Image (cartoon, coloured by chain):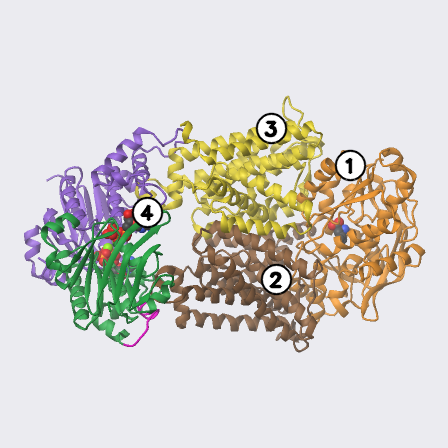
Amino acid sequence: MSIALIIEQLLNGLQLGVMLFLIAAGLTLIFGVMGLINLAHGSLYMIGAFACAAVAAATGSFWIGLVASLAAAAAAGALMEVAVIRRLYERDHLDQVLATFALILILSEGMRWLFGSFPLYLDIPPVLQGAVPLPGGGQYQLYRLAIIGVGIVVAVGLYLLISRTRLGMRIRAGESDREMIAALGVDIRTLYTVVFALGAALAGLAGALVGALQSVQVGMGEPALILAFVVIVIGGIGSIKGALVGAVLVGVVDTMGRFLLPKLLALALPASQANSVGAALASMLIYIVMALILAFRPRGLFAGQA
Amino acid sequence: EPVKIGVITTLSGGGAGLGVDTRDALVLAFKKAGNKDVELVIEDDAQKPELAVQIAEKMIQSDKVDLMTGIIWSNLAMAVVPNTVAQDVIYLSPNAGPSALAGANCHKNYFNVAYQNDNFHEAMGQYANQDYKKTFILAPNYPAGKDSLTGFKRYYKGELAGELYTQVGQTDYAAEIAQIRASGADSVFFFLPGGMGIAFMKQYAQSGVGLPVLGPSFSFSQDVLPAVGDAALGVKNSASWSKDLDNEANKEFVEAFQAEYGRLPSIYAAQSWDTANLILSALAKASVKDKDAFRAALKEADFKSVRGEFTFNTNQHPIQNIYVREVVKEGDVLTNKIIGTAFEKHGDAYVEQCKM
Amino acid sequence: MMAGVSRETWISAVLVALLVAVPLAATAAGEPFYVTLATRIAILALAAVGLNIALGLGGLVSFGHAAFFGLGGYVAGIFAAHAFNGAPLPFGFAATTAMPVIWLVAIALCGLVALPIGAISLRTAGVYFIMITLAFAQMIYYFAVSWPDYGGEDGLSIYVRNSFPGLNTAQPLPYFLLCLGLLAAGLVLFWCIQGSRFGAALEASRQNATRLAAVGITPFGIRLAAFVISAMVTGLAGALFADLNRFVSPSMLSWHMSGELIVLIILGGKGRLFGPLAGAMVYVLFEYALGGITERWQFFLGLILLGVVLFARGGFLGLLAGKARHG
Amino acid sequence: MAEPILQLSEIRKTFGALKATDGVSLDLRKGEIHALIGPNGAGKSTLIHQICGSIRPDSGTIRFLGEDMAGLDMAARVRKGLGRSFQISSLAPEFSALRNVMLAVQARQGSSYRFFRPVAGDRSLTGPAMAMLERVGLEKRAKVPAAELSHGERRQLEIAIALALEPKAFLFDEPMAGLGPEGSKRLTGFLDGLRHEAPILLVEHDMDAVFALADRISVLVYGRIIATGTVAEIRSDPEVRRAYLGDAA
Amino acid sequence: MSLLVLDRVESFYGASQALFGVKLTIEDGEVVALMGRNGMGKTTTISSILGLVRPRAGSIRFAGKELAGLRPHRIARLGLGLVPEGRRCFPNLTVEENLLVAARGSDWTLGRVTELFPRLGERRSQYANTLSGGEQQMLAIGRALMTNPRLLILDEATEGLAPVIRQDIWAAIRKLKAAGQSILVVDKTLSELLPVADRCFVLEKGVTVFEGTPDALTPELQDRYLGV
Ligand SMILES: Nc1ncnc2c1ncn2[C@@H]1O[C@H](COP(=O)(O)OP(=O)(O)OP(=O)(O)O)[C@@H](O)[C@H]1O
Ligand SMILES: Nc1ncnc2c1ncn2[C@@H]1O[C@H](COP(=O)(O)OP(=O)(O)OP(=O)(O)O)[C@@H](O)[C@H]1O
Ligand SMILES: CC(C)C[C@H](N)C(=O)O
Ligand SMILES: [Mg+2]
Ligand SMILES: [Mg+2]
């Protein structure tokens, strides 16, 4: 096992983590601030991916597609908030679960209606194609490096927004007492729509970025959603820092687990068995990690102040 | 009273492309035949076994179908087929071919019109011997995936640079690609149907690994190619069918399909088309109500297969040629072209275990 | 109390009457599929009644109850498989196809598994609880997916439905009646718990656990007991479900399944005795009816569900009975 | 003199750099009302929390009826006979006032794992519960969900629940807060009688009530007890006047 | 023109009516006391003014503008500053952030508020959930002042405060009054309240039953309406 391989795998873990962070950031914001469980967050991710693929196909430019993905997801998010979500803040989590579950059905089937059942494809823009050499002799896909970069920029930006600006203060105040912040003269309703749209846009961005890597299809949101939930719960709901740490943790643990567990087991078991047992254990790994973390830190790694 | 055929197939989710082709070819075949006595009851299984089971129950009990077909995935087939055939309903598989149903659990009401799961992979194992000494192999971690690698290894003589099982439905293969890069392999064999194959190929192409890839047609079939793009050009893959296969039935099929749907048919469409024609050929000879006669008629396989010569083995699985194809570009369209034959009149490895 | 019979009670009575009458009529008319449909409703309702104990009464939103549903299912499947090929069960027990035995094993197993899962999960609360229960269910799910002995991802077929002394379970109607009986038992259990002192403590733990502790009742014990009972009931339903489909696969353990159980409860009206039944009826029937009309049924199902949440607080029962449930 | 019912010795608790409780020793004797007063943020609530078990002290011992409470959680301490009210009301909001009290009655009876037999109409629960509501003057509001009670009514309900536990000692954290003048007067009279049922450790800022009720007063400032004594002693203590009373005495 | 006028206001919680006809007026620069036993509707009246509870009948005018139908933040921006019952500081914000979060206008600044309540200055970067009850109360008042309201509404603002601090708060209220600030106060301690109030309103079961100067609220009336 070479150093280059290990570095490459770590980068893979990091890239997966950053991806998860982009989805999870919006989710944790919406969840932490509005106390809303939004199962349809994965659908926003899907919408971003579809918007990017469709616009990129029509204009021939990935970058225009990327802008479209942000716009489409933000618009869809705002629309969703105004039409449905807004009525749910006062309700308990279960109503939110059902309503946003219904939104998943509607949006997925709606997308299928619009775009058909076949996956769309989206190509990596020319400047980001190919691989770059790594120190230590390996190679790494340029596009994935770019994703890592985007994730870091977003993380820093969000952190500053939430902790340093008055908007962030108001968001956090709304998180603990919505009625009170309104009674102090802050238009919390609009603020919430903005936050929701922001979270949606991040999810849409993630969808577009991933779309170019994988494929754009109906149903791509749900697995991502579950992982994003794992991430924000590990990190501590509402915490941007937590989402970042949780995401990278999940990304690295998952990637390294899949990579190393079969090899470790091969020391004790026959090869084919080690492979399948290893693969099984590896898929369980992040859930085991999550259960362990919650068992010892019941409110996640960076539990909020409240 | 029309003959009712229940079609359970995957019309939504990552595997939808496969089911849509299956359905479209089936519908078209019956339409072309102008047979007014056939009624199709089509339902989406969303690639979920338990849903497939419920649909099957409904088709048998409520729609009272005479025949069933349509299932793409082995795990769904394993859930539906045993109970269906036990209720004396004839089932014809247009795609899935799990080894269990070919061997010990074969059944007189079960006909596989497609292949036994191992077949295409065996062919690729055979073919790989020509050029490669050290292949890296990977497939999803489910029994059809295991059948696949078993099939490959049954014929491959070189060394394995690595053997990996991925998750079913996995969409990111960065970790696997890293291992391929580090393995010192001279080639990569992978079985990843539908969206999985698209994702793998796109990422592989960008990774800079650059080793030649090969696989069964599932990894490079017509539903996958447009999304993968030029990265697939020149890739070798194995199948019992290709659109350029030179026979009357195939020409007619490809033309009709393209005219009707504006796209090229995939292997799934071809197999499904054959299934429809097999049914039609049997209907011409016997009534579905007379099960014995109908089964006998099916068994004769007296239809013009788009795959050329086609007969049933004693376990009611195909004996057919398996070809090696290459991905080529015709105009802007990526498609496959036959470049050789891996096996002639190939059956499967489980037929001995079938007591029928 | 004659005059005090509430509208909710009336509506519930109608639901139950429908559930019983339709299959009888369908059998008479030679349409066994409707019996199967009714059986599915009864079983899903039972599973949801189980979850409703934890979720509706205790506010314990378990997003991992599919684990118990699936475990129950696997008990039925594994017994059937061993009985079919004559191999003894693990630990050398002889396999049987007798449903009562299978049910007891399923219930006991789910109770045993729920105990540690509950004990660990209950250290957390709220959303964290939702997610940690999901985590445990996912672990069991991936275990089942990758454990080849019982089919792994492909699942396990039950070639012959398990048996019940004195009944032909292969026939739709007797099997339906069996499931109906168990559903009734589940409902009685729920009703008893709801009205009991335990139920009062459980509901208090949902509303304000600190208050409960401050009167000297440890919330942990109350919740754990509720979680375990809830898992046992859902596990029993799982065993029935496997026998209904004559098939069990990891998808019974998946998070979709957990989600569906939750949806059934909210749809019907959470914390209400007949909520799960109403939810299961509405959901299964919509699925069936819409599926018959349009390929895009999921779209419309989504719209309907959305309508229920937004405009029918308290679920369908709440909508029809027109008042919030009393505390 | 008989052994105190509740005895704290050298309790310490820090939050980061803040010494919230800085070596507090204090006792509560049979039949008395012991008032604990002190400026806001002095650590009174923190001390109550440590006694009832929702915060663990860093060091020191708490003995109740001769038994060391270390290692017992909140519920266990309540079962031993420590009844408390919260500074900020803590009720089961969906339950009616009556059911809130019934919960305390069933807890006292230790019968919370009974799965059968409905509670509604169970006279062994409703009887005592109703009696408690009457004692605090909330009987007319018995059927109203706690969430719909006004602030002051919730405070009354808190007291009723504490009474229903029939504890061997009461810990009241600002029971008067939120009560109107009438309510305060009434509660004062009520607590006066209650001390004979069980002694009371009373945290309260309402000096009229404290001076009317307390047998002894301890003054807590910055986590330390700076004075303990009778009403007269405390009123005239210049240090206490400066730190706490101002010209209210 | 009066600063605030409530006329026959009726409000509900769901189906249950809490206010049955509340009348209240406040002139510019006046300190008005709103009184009544527990549960008589004082807090509900305040919530109705701020639009947190929507009145179904009657009218509420602030500086001549009808408030009906306005959303709470619009109402607050007209110049109403609320110190709510139970403090309701934002626990996950620091003291300083609590003060800044809704700050408007320029009269009251961070500096002036910490001058009024030095304790808040000392705790400026501490999270509000770790403050003692009294500290939180000061914070709630400071937070309302930071919005530079034309009318300050104090609902039980001295509840749970140590006598010295209460004296400070009453002193602060008197200072505000002297500076011409209009204030609506709810407080149970009549001995402290009556001396600062210019006028009093008493509610009983959601209806205004008394209006007048503190002197007019005789011991008999106090006994009848407030049980003193
Ligand atoms: N969890 C915590 N973390 C940090 N500081 C805390 C915490 N809890 C309390 N404090 C601090 O400890 C001190 C004591 O608080 P406590 O609530 O005990 O005061 P108190 O005497 O009850 O005051 P009041 O009369 O206002 O209720 C306060 O300064 C408070 O800010
Ligand atoms: N959230 C609520 N839901 C339903 N009813 C409520 C609610 N809040 C208050 N009420 C009812 O409205 C009436 C008036 O309550 P309000 O809180 O205005 O009284 P208050 O005069 O402020 O009393 P206190 O002095 O106790 O604070 C009471 O009868 C109370 O039970
Ligand atoms: C799409 C196909 C490749 C499916 C595969 N043969 C299976 O049985 O699951
Ligand atoms: Mg306190
Ligand atoms: Mg009030």
Q: Give amino acid for label 1.
A: Val
Residue E105 among those drawn in magenta: yes
Which range is magenta? E94-106
**The C terminus of chain B sits in image quarter:** top right
Whether label 4 lies within 8 Å of ligand 2 gets the answer: yes
Q: Residues within 10 Å of mark 1 (few under 14, many from 20)?
A: some
Residue D234 picture location, percent across and down: 8, 55
Residue C281 picture location, percent across and down: 58, 39
Q: Quadrant of residue B213?
A: bottom right
Residue corresponding to mark 4? D148
Chain coloured yellow: which letter? C
In which chain is the residue bearing label 3?
C
For residue C178, the mark is 3
Residue A146 showing in the rendered view? yes
Mark 4 vs 3: CB contact within 8 A:
no
Give SS at disc 3: helix
Q: CA distance from mark 3 to mark 1?
A: 26 Å
